[in-house]
Image: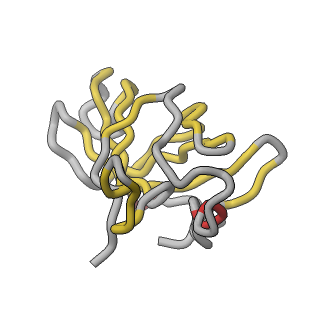
Amino acid sequence: MGCYNWIEFVAECPFCSKSTKIVAQTKVCSSYDGDDSGRFHDHRYVIGQEMRWWKENAPKYKNWFDESVIKIENGFLECCYSECKNCDSNDIFAVICFQDKTITSVEKIGRINDWPDEFSK
């Protein structure tokens, strides 16, 4: 069983075509480990927010992302399973951009059947 965090944003759902809240499930900065403030999973974040993680001098700091992300010039991209809060469709993906541990943007949203080939599921 994996652990996740959640990123909430407003976008047009590819199923109901409404501009609504979408919730994406991310592995970034997610661990059952934690520090004195608690575990690093099951937290909700929004675009522009820095995610909780180990301090830079901690040995586990470098593990804030895994092999599911793709390195780009200004950060990393992760393709995340997502859900529309209007129509409850969970057959959605969102490509999220991270710079360091900060969520910077949603690059793409679509139906699971159109999952981008460059990302593993």
Q: How many marks?
A: 0
Whether residue 117 is visible here, answered yes or no, is no
Whether residue 72 is visible here, answered yes or no, is yes
User: Quadrant of the image for the N terminus?
Assistant: bottom left
Q: Residue furthest right?
A: 73
Residue 78: % across, % down: 56, 55
What colouring does the structure picture have? secondary structure
Residue shown at the point (50%, 56%) measured from the top left? 28
Is 29 placed left or right of 85 in the picture? right
Is 32 placed left or right of 118 in the picture? left
Residue 101: % across, % down: 59, 44
Residue shown at the point (44%, 46%) measured from the top left? 110
Above or below, comparing residue 65 to residue 44 in the picture: below
Residue shown at the point (66%, 63%) measured from the top left? 62
Q: Nearer the viewer, residue 55 or 44?
A: 55
Q: Nearer the viewer, residue 55 or 13?
A: 55
Residue shown at the point (58%, 67%) measured from the top left? 60
Q: Residue furthest bottom?
A: 1
Quarter of the view holding residue 119: bottom right
Q: Residue furthest top?
A: 19
Residue 34: % across, % down: 38, 60
Quarter of the view holding residue 61: bottom right
